[in-house]
Amino acid sequence: MAAFDLQEQEQIAELKAWWAQWGKLVMAVIAAIVIGYLGSMGWKLWQKSQAGGAADAYAAVEKAFDAKDPLKTRAAADAMAADYASHALSARAMLLAAKAAHDGKDLAKARTALEWVAGNAKEEAIIDIARLRLSAVLLDQKQYDAALKAVDAPQAEGFAALFAEARGDALTLKGDAPAAKLAYQAALAKLGKEAPSRTLIETKLSALGV
């Protein structure tokens, strides 16, 4: 880790405190993306697979998730992954299991579920969503290098700003303020002037003294 002067150390400490306070909000934003994508695309996939067992298996996952039962959600998702590993709905099922585990404060199970999605999903958008959520979970676990690695790979253009912001978060908490500034600036460059997340990223930059 690079040596920092007192002012930079204070700025990094402030941002770590910021993450402790607002990290759940970041996860909520990513979760909203997940649920929105599942809602728009999952229904079409469900209709196509309605005649097969994958639809029934996914329905069991959704039922457990709606009941806010993380253990049953994960068990149903694991069963689906075992029986229908190549089916697109299996990745969605595991995303629901990851969210249920995170809501239940079981970061270890959330992490393994997201790792499964990142390694097994066939759709680029689902993989990107999983890697973003995985990075946030790893930050909660204080696994900063692993969090950075999760989002240090090519992604769809629509996710570029989110990935740059996630890299900025990991670099900040790792203690690399100069690199974090560049990552946040890259995120802002990918966003429109009216993007709601601009204010949040600008706040993070401000905490780093920019």
Image (cartoon, grey):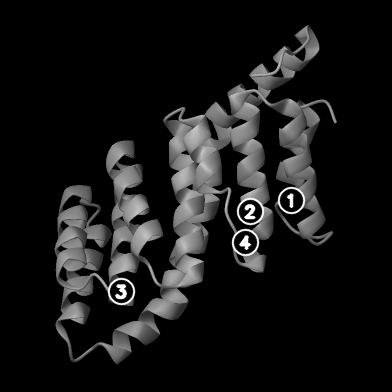
Q: Report whether residue 19 is seen.
A: yes
Amino acid type, label 2: Leu
Dots 2, 3 in contact, CB < 8 A: no
Sequence-earlier tag: 1 or 3: 3
Disc 3 from disc 4: Cα separation: 21 Å
Q: Crowding near pointer 2: few (<14 within 10 Å), some, many (20+)? A: many
Camera sees residue 105: no
Q: Secondary structure at mark 1?
A: helix
Residue 94 location in percent, x, y? 30, 60
Mark 4 near mark 2, Cβ–Cβ under 8 Å?
yes
Q: How far is the residue under mark 1 from the one under mark 4?
A: 10 Å
Q: Secondary structure at mark 2?
A: helix
Q: Are marks 2 and 1 in contact (CB under 8 Å)?
A: yes
Counting residues from the start of the chain, the first of labels 2 and 3 encountered is 3
Q: Which residue is mark 1?
A: 187
Residue receiving disc 3: 89
Residue at the spot of label 4: 159
- Which residue is tagged 2? 162
- Estimate the spatial distance between the alpha carbons at disc 2 and disc 3, rounded to whole Å: 24 Å
Please determine whether, in this image, residue 177 is positioned above or below residue 119.
above
